[in-house]
Image (tube, rainbow, N blue to C red):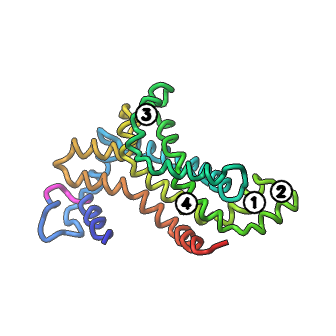
C-alpha cells in the first residue's frame, strides 16, 4: 500500500509541471525535468542540503545519547538491586502518562533561562531521555539469564564490565530496533523544532518542508521532489536495519 503513493511521488518529482495531473497517470514521464526539480529543492532559495545536515546531526546525536542513557537505565532497573528500585521505576514509568504537550511551556521557559533555546543542543537533549526506551529495553535486559551475571561477579567483574561485555551484546538487536525507532521519531519530529527553533539556518527538514510547501504550493513537481528527499533516509534506514528489527522482535519472545 505504501509503494503506490511513493511511486507516484517519485514519478511526479521527475515531471514538468504541465504533466503532473495528466490522465491517465504517466508513471514514466514523457518529458523529464527531474534534474531541474531536484536542483531547485537542494540548492534553491531554501537549500535542503543545509536542512538535511541539521536533521542528520540532531537525529544521529539524539539516537546515540538516547540509546546510551536508556540502556544504562534499563540495565540498572533490571539487574541492579538497590533500595526502592521497583518504586523508583514505577515513578519513572508514571511520568510517561503525562502528555508531552503539558510539559512544553515549562521546557520553553527553562530553555530560555539556561540558554538552550534556538539551538540544536536543546533539541538533542529533549529527545535524549526516553521513558519508553527505558521501559522497552528493561524488558529485554530482564531476559538476560542471571546465571551469566552471577558467574561474572564470581570472576570479579563489576556491573560496568558486566553491562558492556555480557548484557549489551545479548540485547544488541533490541537496542538496534530502538535506535531505528528513535531515529525515525526524531527525523519526523515537527513539534519540538517548531517551538524551540527560530533561526532559519537551524531548521530541520520538517520545518523546511512546511516552509517550502507554503512558498511553492502551486508547483507540485517541486513539492514531490522535496517530499521524496525528506523520506528517502527513512527508507534507507529501514532497509539497512530490517534484519535487526526482526531479530529484536524474535528476542522479545525469549524469556530468561
Mark toward the start of the polypeptide (2 vs 1): 2
Q: Is residue 27 left or right of residue 87?
A: left
Q: Give me the disc on residue 157.
A: 2
Q: Which residue was labeled with disc 1?
A: 165
**Label 1 Cα crowd, 10 Å radius (few <14 / some 14-19 / many 20+):** few
Give the alpha-carbon distance from disc 1 to disc 4, as whole Å. Answer: 20 Å
Q: Is residue 119 left or right of residue 83?
A: left
Between 74 and 21, which is closer to the camera in this rendering?
74
Q: Secondary structure at mark 4?
A: helix
Disc number lying in front (1 or 4): 4
**Label 3 Cα crowd, 10 Å radius (few <14 / some 14-19 / many 20+):** few
Look at the picture and state if 226 lies above or below 203: below
Give the alpha-carbon distance from disc 2 to disc 1, as whole Å. Answer: 10 Å
Residue range highlighted in magenta? 14-18
The N terminus is located in which quarter? bottom left
At 24% from the left and 56% from the top, the residue drawn is 33
Disc number lying in front (3 or 1): 3
**Label 4 Cα crowd, 10 Å radius (few <14 / some 14-19 / many 20+):** some
Q: Are marks 3 and 1 in contact (CB under 8 Å)?
A: no
Q: Give me the disc on residue 136.
A: 4
Mark toward the start of the polypeptide (4 vs 3): 3
Residue farthest to the left?
23
Amino acid at each position: 500500500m505504501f509503494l503506490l503513493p511513493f511511486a507516484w511521488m517519485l514519478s511526479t518529482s521527475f515531471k514538468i509541471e504541465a504533466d503532473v495531473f495528466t490522465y491517465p497517470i504517466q508513471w514514466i514521464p514523457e518529458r523529464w525535468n527531474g534534474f531541474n526539480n531536484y536542483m531547485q529543492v537542494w540548492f534553491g532559495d531554501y537549500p535542503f542540503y543545509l536542512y538535511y545536515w541539521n536533521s542528520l546531526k540532531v537525529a544521529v546525536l539524539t539516537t546515540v545519547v538516547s540509546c546510551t542513557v536508556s540502556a544504562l537505565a534499563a540495565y540498572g532497573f533490571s539487574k541492579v538491586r538497590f533500595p526502592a528500585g521497583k518504586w523508583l521505576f514505577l515513578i519513572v514509568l508514571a511520568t510517561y502518562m503525562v502528555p508531552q504537550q503539558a510539559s512544553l511551556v515549562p521546557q520553553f521557559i527553562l530553555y530560555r533561562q539556561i540558554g538552550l533555546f534556538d539551538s540544536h543542543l536543546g533539541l538533542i537533549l529533549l529527545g535524549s531521555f526516553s521513558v519508553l526506551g527505558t521501559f522497552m529495553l528493561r524488558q529485554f535486559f530482564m531476559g538476560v539469564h542471571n546465571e551469566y551475571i552471577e558467574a561474572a561477579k564470581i570472576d570479579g567483574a563489576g556491573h560496568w564490565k558486566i553491562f558492556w561485555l555480557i548484557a549489551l551484546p545479548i540485547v544488541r538487536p533490541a537496542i538496534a530496533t530502538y535506535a531505528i525507532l528513535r531515529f525515525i521519531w526524531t527525523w519526523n519530529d515537527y513539534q519540538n523544532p517548531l517551538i524551540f527553533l527560530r533561526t532559519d539556518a537551524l531548521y530541520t527538514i520538517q520545518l523546511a518542508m512546511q516552509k517550502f510547501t507554503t512558498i511553492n504550493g502551486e508547483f507540485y513537481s517541486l513539492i514531490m521532489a522535496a517530499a521524496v528527499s525528506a523520506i528517502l533516509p527513512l527508507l534507507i534506514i529501514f532497509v539497512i536495519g530490517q534484519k535487526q528489527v526482526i531479530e529484536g522482535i524474535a528476542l522479545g519472545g525469549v524469556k530468561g
